[in-house]
Image: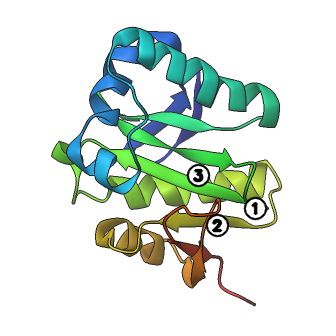
Amino acid sequence: MNVIESARLTLRELVLQDAHFILRLLNEPAFLRFIGDKGVRTLADARDYISKGPMDSYRRHGFGLYLTSLRHCGTPIGVCGLVKRDTLADVDVGFAFLSSHWSKGYAAESAAAVLAYGTETLGIKRIVALTAPDNYGSIAVLEKVGLTLEGRIRLVKDAPELNLFGPPTK
């Protein structure tokens, strides 16, 4: 069942049958560099990631990362959704796409749709975003959807600093 639809994309909850795609996405060089190594090396690892990550988040929070597919053909191209981290007060929007689908506007389109869904449908007051300081592609996406750099934070002590983006102040 689709959770969000935009002009070119559909976003739905991840299921265990998405393990092949998740295995591929989480091992892309840019994912490993900018988001981190999740230790997903096998289909069993991918199913475990889906179960303990997105599926658990749907149960606990009513939202999570969603499989993002091309609307016209159903081809999965990435994930985009909302994440509630234990070490961050706010909910954050996150996304990752296969590099073969970069520079086509999909990240901005899905992030804008997720932000609208989070605020209008779920009633979340403040949604932020995190990026590595040198992840210029994601920084451009966040700026395109209207988020602004608020500063740098560490999610845990001794972790690398991340850029914190938030909604514009009114």
Q: In the picture, residue 151 is in which quadrant?
A: bottom right
Q: In the picture, residue 130 is in which quadrant?
A: bottom right
**Alpha carbon distance from label 2 to label 3:** 12 Å
Name the residue at 64% across, 75% down: 166
- Rendered-image quadrant of the N terminus: top right
Q: In the picture, residue 120 is in which quadrant?
A: bottom right
159, 141: nearer the viewer:
159
Note whether 164 is above or below 90 in the view shown: below
- Disc 3 marks which amino acid? Val
- Rendered-image quadrant of the C terminus: bottom right
Camera sees residue 72: no
Residue bearing mark 1 = 90
Q: Nearer the viewer, mark 1 or mark 3?
A: 1
Residue 145 place in picture, x, y as percent? 49, 71
Q: Given the current orientation, which residue lies at the most extreme left position? A: 100
Residue 123 place in picture, x, y as percent? 83, 55
Which element is circle 1 on? loop
Which element is circle 3 on? helix
- Disc 1 marks which amino acid? Asp
Residue bearing mark 2 = 128
89, 156: nearer the viewer:
156
Residue bearing mark 3 = 114
Please report whichever mark, 2 or 3, sits nearer to the chain's N-terminal start: 3
Name the residue at 50% across, 57% down: 111
Residue 62 place in picture, x, y as percent? 77, 34
